[in-house]
């Protein structure tokens, strides 16, 4: 029966597909399709893995027998019997075969999909003994996955790491045309990068806020997504038909044919609208009263430069370099690897400026799934060792990044942007390290180029001491995602307080307005690179507050440009001041 789950709308558009429920712990399992003529080979691979695990268990049993210790360890012996039984279980084997044969999932994906199906049945069992067998099943599946890791698929490789160039051609088999949507309890930003080249047409998570980094990456991928949908991953079953309405933040499960038709129509309308907007690509972003507006792109990977150019961006306003550092089990990219990445971004932008932000890990952007560095598992990570604090705590790592950026600056225009500064001492230390990095390169005779230095304004303490920042930096970039989080004391990634995360709260607007006004008064560049910049509902207000430079996901640029073309800034300034003075600015925003 059809039902609806409500969450937060984070990435626009409609996706219609069958649900793939992925347990958080299994997200790094490879997901790809195999070709129809490779199905049999994939089943064989699975069979070999199962037989291998059976052999392993039988060996342990035999050694117990030899040692005569079976009686001494009756529990272990019984457990091994249970595992052997589960491995032969008809529901597991036939279910896994079904996903490979009917859906052409790769063996690992098929196995974890069927695990989810059976695990749910265990969850619903009354008998606590049987309920506990779920853990055994998980162990058995884990052993098979491990076995398969040693036996690579003969037909396709898992997702290549982001820096290995072209996506694997076997990832998507057009002969399997059932669209799939991913349903998970949670996805980390690093998981999202894996999905960038994946088979999913949309996703839903139980947790997360509108400006959580998972949501941000979804927007950059331009796939419909809903986060903070509470218990969606429990309510939705494997293979259910699902409609994700990324504009309304709604997930419709098992929709009626009428709803399917209605949303199918909306989906096509969205495509038509995108096509219409694409005609604005080469139109200069100039307001009705002749103000030129700079529209820049936010990127997560050097390869995103192509999307930035395609959307008509005049540069990159924010390259979130932390994505180069995540999901590597603590092995951070060295200077050479970083230089290669920055070089790709600079070359990709073909002479347009690239703003490279130094690494901003921590809070909802952990380096890895499990904490590998001190401070990562702290109770309150958003207030802990993140962003510039993390960099200053490890000067050798930071210097390597700075050298890589300075070297790339010899190849094209680069702005170097520093996240989350709040203290004069942090500013001094950062600038001293930039000088030191330059001196190190000079000493080695390595070529480097000039950079413009910028500070992110994303902590209220910074927004309240703008003259300090203007003394030391060439430009400012307002990170509204964090500025809102820290001003209102609302965790941006926590759906439980998402209703209080308010971009037009008078306190937030005052800090934004003040930053823009003071930077402009001194003739220094100022832009907004938080999600506010890409929100068409905020364009008029930001223009009215004097903002002339916006940085956002490439996918949002054309819609914001359309707004800009319709605006007259001379008329917006007075209105923006009245919004600033209002008790309830949101009420005036609709005027
Ligand atoms: C911000 O805080 O607004 C910002 C752009 O940085 P990030 O979202 O990466 O924290
Ligand atoms: Mg930030």
Image (tube, helix red, strand yellow):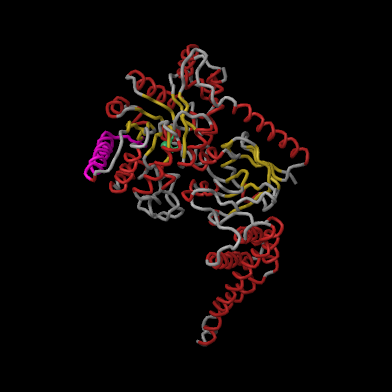
Q: Is residue 367 above or below residue 47?
A: above
The reply to whether the magenta stretch includes residue 425 is yes
Between residues 479 and 526, which one lies in front from this camera angle? Answer: 526
**Residue located farthest toward the right when viewing the structure as drawn:** 257
Quarter of the image where one finds residue 136? bottom right
Q: Position of residue 425 (x, y in %)?
A: 25, 36
Q: Which quadrant of the figure contains the C terminus?
A: top right
Identify the main secondary structure in magenta. Answer: helix
User: x and y percent of residue 245 in the render?
Assistant: 65, 37
Determine whether, in the image, residue 257 is placed left or right of residue 548. Answer: right
- The residue segment tinted magenta is 417-443
Front position in the image: 460 or 349? 349
Indicate the position of residue 580 as horizontal and vertical percent values.
45, 19
Residue at image point 51% right, 21% down: 284
On the picture, is 32 further left or further right than 336? right
Query: Residue 158 at x, y = what percent?
Result: 55, 56
Q: Is residue 453 magenta?
A: no
Q: For residue 420, what is the image quadrant?
A: top left
Q: Which residue occupies 53% across, 66% down?
A: 146
Image quarter for ligand 1 equals top left
């Amino acid at each position: 029966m059809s039902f609806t789950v409500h969450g937060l709308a984070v990435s626009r558009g409609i996706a219609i597909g069958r649900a793939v429920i992925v347990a958080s712990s299994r997200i790094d399992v490879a997901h790809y399709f195999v070709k129809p003529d490779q199905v049999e080979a994939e089943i064989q691979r699975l069979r070999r893995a199962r037989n291998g695990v059976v052999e392993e268990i039988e060996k342990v049993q035999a050694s117990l027998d030899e040692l005569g210790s079976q009686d001494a360890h009756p529990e272990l012996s019984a457990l091994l019997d249970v595992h052997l039984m589960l491995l032969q279980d008809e529901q597991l084997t036939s279910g896994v075969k079904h996903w490979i044969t009917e859906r052409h999932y790769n063996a690992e994906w098929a196995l974890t999909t069927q695990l989810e199906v059976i695990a749910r049945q265990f969850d619903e069992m009354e008998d606590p003994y049987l309920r506990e067998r779920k853990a055994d099943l998980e162990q058995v599946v884990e052993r098979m996955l491990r076995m398969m890791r040693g036996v690579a698929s003969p037909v396709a490789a898992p997702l290549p790491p982001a820096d290995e160039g072209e996506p694997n051609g076997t990832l998507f088999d057009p002969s399997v045309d059932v669209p799939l949507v991913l349903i998970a309890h949670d996805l980390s930003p690093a998981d999202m990068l894996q999905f960038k080249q994946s088979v999913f047409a949309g996703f839903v998570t139980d947790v997360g806020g509108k400006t959580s980094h998972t949501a941000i990456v979804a927007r950059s991928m331009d796939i419909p997504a809903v986060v903070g949908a509470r218990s969606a991953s429990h309510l939705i079953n494997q293979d259910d038909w699902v409609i994700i309405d990324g504009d309304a933040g709604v997930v419709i499960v098992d929709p009626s044919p009428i709803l399917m038709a209605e949303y199918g129509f909306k989906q096509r309308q969205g495509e038509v609208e995108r096509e219409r907007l694409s005609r604005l690509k080469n139109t200069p972003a100039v307001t009705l009263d002749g103000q030129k507006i700079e529209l820049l792109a936010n990127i997560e990977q050097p390869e995103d430069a192509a999307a930035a150019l395609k959307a008509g961006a005049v540069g990159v306003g924010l390259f979130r370099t932390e994505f180069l550092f995540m999901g590597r089990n603590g092995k951070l990219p060295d200077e050479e690897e970083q230089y290669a990445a920055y070089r790709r971004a600079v070359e990709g932008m073909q002479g347009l400026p690239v703003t490279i932000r130094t690494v901003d890990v921590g809070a909802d952007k952990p380096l890895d799934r499990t904490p590998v560095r001190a401070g990562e598992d702290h109770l309150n990570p958003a207030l802990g060792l993140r962003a510039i604090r993390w960099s200053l705590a490890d000067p050798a790592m930071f210097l390597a990044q700075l050298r890589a950026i300075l070297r790339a600056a010899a190849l094209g225009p680069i702005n170097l942007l520093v996240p989350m500064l709040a203290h004069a001492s942090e500013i001094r230390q950062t600038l001293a390290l930039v000088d030191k990095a330059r001196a190190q390169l000079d000493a080695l005779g390595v070529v480097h180029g000039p950079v413009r230095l910028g500070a992110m304004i994303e902590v209220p303490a910074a927004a309240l001491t703008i003259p300090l920042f203007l003394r030391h930096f060439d430009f400012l970039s307002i990170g509204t995602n964090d500025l809102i989080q820290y001003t209102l004391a609302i965790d941006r990634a926590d759906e439980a307080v998402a209703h209080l995360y308010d971009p037009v709260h008078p306190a937030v607007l005052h800090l934004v307005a003040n930053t823009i006004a003071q930077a402009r008064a001194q003739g220094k560049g100022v832009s907004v690179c938080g999600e506010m910049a890409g929100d068409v509902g905020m364009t008029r207000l930001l223009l009215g507050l004097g903002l002339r430079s916006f940085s956002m996901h490439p996918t949002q640029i054309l819609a914001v440009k359309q707004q800009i073309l319709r605006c007259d800034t001379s008329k917006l300034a007075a209105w923006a001041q009245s919004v600033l003075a209002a008790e309830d600015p949101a009420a005036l925003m609709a005027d």
